[in-house]
Each structure stands twice: as structure tokens, then as C-alpha cells.
Amino acid sequence: MYPPPYGHVPTSSAYYLGIISIVMAFFMSVIGLIMGVVAVYLGNQDKQKGLLKADTGVKLGIVGIVLAVVFIAINLIFASLMFGLF
């Protein structure tokens, strides 16, 4: 097996999923929640492999999960107030 090219270091996909989960939490909260959960899962697996930015991916995934849950709760509160459920 050949070594990676100069300057190329494999990074965790959890890092990118964590960033996307934060962005998606603002627009489509359920998708942001799902991506956050996947980022945490993959980040924990990639930590064992020693990939770079795996720990950051886990942290970003957790932030994405929290934001998504907050926005889902806010949407449910506004929807219930709009339709007079309370």
C-alpha cells in the first residue's frame, strides 16, 4: 500500500457531517438531528482508527443535535400556539 500524497492527511467524515448538521438544524431540523447522530456515531468509530478531526466531529455533531432539538421544540410550540392546542 502506498503512503498518502504529500500534504494529504485523511480526516474523519464526522467533521463534515457535524458542520452540515449545524447548518441543517436551522433550516430542516429533523435532517440536522439525523446528521448530528450520524456524526457522533462515525466520530466515535474514527477516534479508534486515529483519524484527524474525529473528536471535533463528535463535538460538532453534539452541537448539531442540541440545536436541532431546540428548533424542533420551538417549532412545536409555535405550531401549537398557532392552531390553539394549548
Image: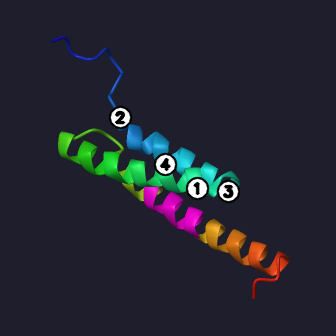
Seen from the viewer's position, the closer of residues 63 and 7 is 63
| Sequence-earlier tag: 3 or 2 | 2
Picture residue at 21% right of the left edge, 41% below the top: 50
| Sequence-earlier tag: 2 or 1 | 2
Q: CA distance from mark 2 to mark 4?
A: 17 Å
The residue carrying mark 2 is 11
> Residue flagged by tag 2: what amino acid is it?
Thr
Q: Assess whether residue 68 is covered by the magenta stretch.
A: yes
At label 3, counting other C-alpha atoms closer than 10 Å, the crowd grade (few under 14, some 14-19, many 20 or more) is: some
| Sequence-earlier tag: 2 or 4 | 2
Seen from the viewer's position, the closer of residues 39 and 80 is 80
The residue carrying mark 3 is 26
The residue carrying mark 1 is 30
Farthest-out residue, bottom: 86
Picture residue at 82% right of the left edge, 76% below the top: 83
> Residue flagged by tag 3: what amino acid is it?
Phe
Q: Secondary structure at mark 2?
A: loop
> Residue flagged by tag 4: what amino acid is it?
Met
The stretch of residues the image draws in magenta is: 61-69
Label 2 or label 1, whichever lies nearer to me, is 1
The residue carrying mark 4 is 35
Q: Secondary structure at mark 1?
A: helix
Q: CA distance from mark 3 to mark 4?
A: 13 Å
Picture residue at 56% right of the left edge, 67% below the top: 69
**Residue 40: x percent and y percent?**
37, 53
Q: CA distance from mark 3 to mark 1?
A: 10 Å
Q: Secondary structure at mark 3?
A: helix
Q: Is residue 85 above or below residue 50?
A: below
Label 4 or label 1, whichever lies nearer to me, is 1
Q: CA distance from mark 4 to mark 1?
A: 9 Å
